[in-house]
Image (spheres, rainbow, N blue to C red):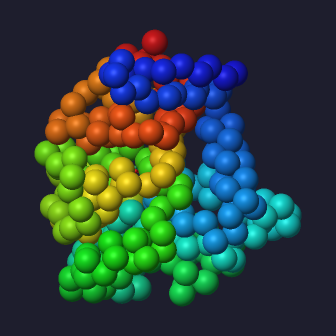
Amino acid sequence: MSDERAAGDAAAPVEVRVLATAEEVCEAVADELVELARRRPEAVLGLATGSTMIGLYAALSARVRDGAVSLERVRTFNLDEYLGLPEASPRSFRAFMDEHLFGPCGIDAARVAFPVAPGAEGADVRAFEDAIHAAGGIDLQLLGLGGNGHIAFNEPGSLRDSRTRAVELAPRTRADAAAAFGGLDSVPTRAVTMGVGTILEARTIRVLALGAHKADVVSRMLAGAPGSELPAGFLAGHPDVRLLVDAAAASGPDGR
Ligand code: GLP
């Protein structure tokens, strides 16, 4: 099943692609990444974490394993990282990326960047932004959606022109992460995130939302919720943004 349509603010639509299953979404985005990396082996990728990305990274790793593409020369910039975790925490976004993408795809540590290293006290956010510019800017940025409409860790109230910075996590965001951390008390309260303005400078943005638990945030985004309330709303108006959803995430706020 494929259903292409434009939705959201009429003046600044977000293109939406609905596919039947999460697997189909992951395969479609993996195809686009493979095409980019073949055309531009030194492509600059903006990477996201979260359960939404696991299937995509598995699909991409399979293509690398099959010899369909090499990712050894890409540069990568991750969206965000928690503050306050021990350096070796398996819950850091760095550990997630090592497990799901960098390890399986042979992407060398020298070619990856995070806005802060796990275990670090503070971030050199200026150096992170400078490194993106020095690399020529991000060719393709992957994004998931937080349950409260955040993108990366830009929580509701973030500004459209915000840059990479340390932030407090919203209560909803911490609650959503509680199971993965074995309890709310173990979830960090702060993180460093790429800013909304930084994200919007990527040449291409692909947003993935999978599962019925994302139906509400997807429908709010497509209804044109203002970015100040729902940061994903800031993506409307970007010249090359597409939202890819499975049927469950497209089912509307009450599952219809
Ligand atoms: C975290 C990340 C976001 C991600 C979100 C959704 O909050 N900072 O970048 O989009 O989780 O996670 P999941 O894919 O597990 O629903």
User: Which of these two is toward me, 83 or 242?
Assistant: 242
Going 44% across and 47% down the picture, which residue do you hit?
A: 144
Instruction: Residue 199: give x, y in percent of width and height.
Output: 36, 55
Task: Pinpoint residue 100: horizontal percent, then vertical percent.
Answer: 59, 66
Residue 25, horizontal then vertical, whole percent: 63, 39
Relative to 19, residue 65 above or below: below
246 sits left or right of 49 in the view: right
In the rendered image, the residue lying farthest to the top is 256
Q: Is residue 122 left or right of residue 92?
A: left
> Is residue 75 something that shows in the picture?
yes
Q: Is residue 80 left or right of residue 226?
A: right
Tell me what residue is drawn at x 19 percent, y 68 percent.
Answer: 166
Can residue 216 be seen at all in this image of the molecule? no
Number of dots carrying numbers: 0
Left/right of residue 20 with respect to residue 45 in the rendered view:
right
Q: In the depicted view, which residue is nearer to us: 129 or 154?
A: 129
**Which corner quadrant holds the N terminus?**
top right
Name which residue lies at 26% across and 66% down: 164
At horizontal 45% and vertical 65% (from top left) the residue drawn is: 137
Where is residue 39? Give x, y as percent: 73, 59
208 over 152 or under it: above or below: above
Q: Compared to 197, does 157 lie above or below?
A: above
